[in-house]
Amino acid sequence: MSDVADIPPGELSEDEARAAHARIADEIRLHNEAYYQDDAPTVSDAEYDALFARLLALEEAHPGLRTEDSPTQRVGAAPAQGFAKVRHSVPMLSLGNAFDEADVGEFLARIRRFLNLPEDDAIDIVAEPKIDGLSVSLRYEKGRFVRGATRGDGSEGEDITANLRTIGDIPDKIAGDVPDVIEVRGEVYLPKSAFLKLNAAHEEAGAKVFANPRNAAAGSLRQLDVAVTAKRPLRMFAYSWGELSAEIADTQWEFLERISGWGFQTNPLSRRCGTLEDIIAFHTDVGEQRASLDYDIDGVVYKVNRLDLQRRLGFVSRAPRWAIAHKFPAEQAMTVLNDIDIQVGRTGSLTPVARLEPVTVGGVVVSNATLHNEDEIRRKDVRIGDTVVVQRAGDVIPQVVRVVADKRPKGATPYAFPTHCPVCGSEAVRGEDEAVRRCTGGLICSAQVVERLKHFVSRDAFDIEGLGAKHITAFHADGFVDGPADIFRLKARRDVLLEREGWGEQSVDNLLDAIEERRTIGLDRFIYALGIRQVGQATARLLARNYGTLDAWRAAMNAAQDRESAAYRDLLDIDGIGASVAEDILAFLHEDHNRQVLDDLDELLEIEALEAADTDTPVSGKTIVFTGTLEKMTRSEAKARAEALGAKVSGSVSSKTDLVVAGPGAGSKARKAAELGIETIDEDTWIDLIGG
């Protein structure tokens, strides 16, 4: 089967595109959270950019996928907990990327096309080094610094005013002809020299060392103890603005000169460029200086100089049309791959990690690098003992680029990727369109268990009042809760809980009472709580409605393990469950550990059938297929109405289908219904049938 990742988005069906979009969007959200909230990026900039470009291409080819919650419409991740939230009066947007001279040339051409300028018309550009730090916004009222915030998700960030006041580059007051309100924006960074000293001190004290200066800057700036921030020699370069009560310049260059006069630091390497040749020469020049600079940069930002043109150009989704970031190529080095380890992520993903002979790449000693997945290992033919080329793409996560074939040792054998989880021994399987292999142990795998337990008690699952993520983490660390069933055995540990700091009789009894209240739960919430991959609330409800009881569902899924069985076809016939989702459900229930967890929970809980739909209707008990375009209600509304009236909605026509509702454009499903002699009606007749 071909990997849809290799197929141009325009050649994918709507279902294939939707599945690919959902998978990539979820992956990007996890990377955003790791980067913006945890200051611990899990992929390189280049990998992230490739994922984001694929998502944009999917939305370009299938516009219906571009929803408000898509990562392409947002910046970063939601603010982390611990600081008050700040709503940005003017969103803090991200930038589009250019990777070579052709991309930059196209950027200039797009500007000319948008503004209807002649091809030979010069566009004045301000070029600035792209600082690899933490973006902040500083609000001044009547010349006084009143609030500072992180970017957050672009719309809402964290209030870190007190921490920012410790940075010498940020003036408390600005004097002169200053607007009543101005938000100065820039990048906080930690100089490389300070970073090396900080890590040396941490290493000597046995504390955690930072991966790079950007992580160190972010970690320093988001300390709840301001005294810790004050000890770190943070710096800031200012480069733009947010809310502005009065205009202060006509060009980007004038703005930089103006804020420099107010005491802000602007990057001394910034330059005005009039041609593409000037721009590329500047990029080359800055790239050559990169290693000698006392701050990390990962590219150059180009901005249209004239502010009136910036206003005309405006924005597209999450980025301005008038600016772009030209990234630097990754730095590389050669070393020996000593071993390959498999790390299991919190969602069960098995990620191969190369253990390297330590080598310096871009001024940082690298001893580990990602190998991405088993397909990449096979494609590059990476073997233990090989000499490999390593790069730090985007100065974040090192990766193995290629093998130096003529240095391969004799006897080196191809790497056999494990088919079972190295942590819990459960099967590790691949989804239909995925390159990642995942552990199916979920509820019993120690690499995943805490996150799975947090999901199990979350609001839309068991929703146990007083048992939040913090308590789950603590109870698991103390050995009280190793699996979901242990939650319902906590009553036997009441005396031990009372001995814990911060727990009194009332709080312990309140928690135990809340747990007791959840011993009875609906089948749909129960299925959702299991955390089966791709099974959200809607899918859990579909399963509960179609199978009725836990025993019936489990029996059907056991039978459906035979992919030639009627039970498997019945599962695929449920409208909204495709082959990929079905495989994840069956993989979960195929694993003996998970079946044991279900047995355990079944003994402790009363799992109720989904609230019965209306059975006294013209369509109760019937299997209905909707096809074509519905004009008086959405497809989702029609399906919901049918289910509420006791019908089952299927995605395909078969001999079990009782009724087909066909709108304009109905094709193969309507033809198959006619061949099978199945009753077919139009939308108006359907509405009359169900009473409007």
Image (cartoon, helix red, strand yellow):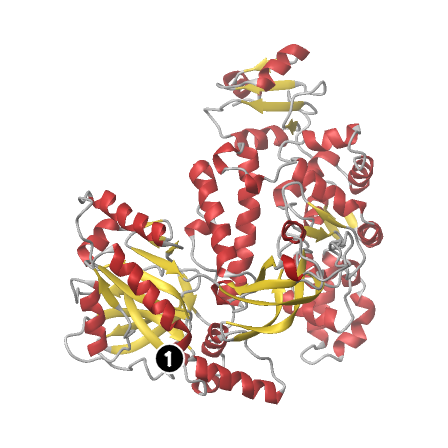
- Residue 338, picture quadrant: bottom right
Query: Residue 530, can we see it?
Result: no
x 61%, y 23%: residue = 625
Name the residue: 68% across, 23% down: 622
Residue 284 vs 506, above or below: the answer is above
Q: Quadrant of the N terminus?
A: top right
Q: Find numbered disc 1 in the image and state the secondary structure of the residue it sits on.
A: strand
Q: Is residue 623 left or right of residue 390?
A: right
Residue 356: give x, y in percent of width and height.
65, 69
Mark 1 Cα within 10 Å, few/some/many (few <14, many 20+)?
many
Q: Nearer the viewer, residue 209 or 368?
A: 368
Q: Left or right? Give the position of 674 relative to 13.
A: right
Where residue 311 sits in the image (x, y, percent)?
22, 53
Q: Residue furthest front?
A: 406
- Residue 269 is drawn in which quadrant? bottom left
The residue that mark 1 highlights is 235
Vertical relation: 603 (above or below) 491: above
Kindly identify the amino acid type of the residue bearing the numbered disc 1. Arg
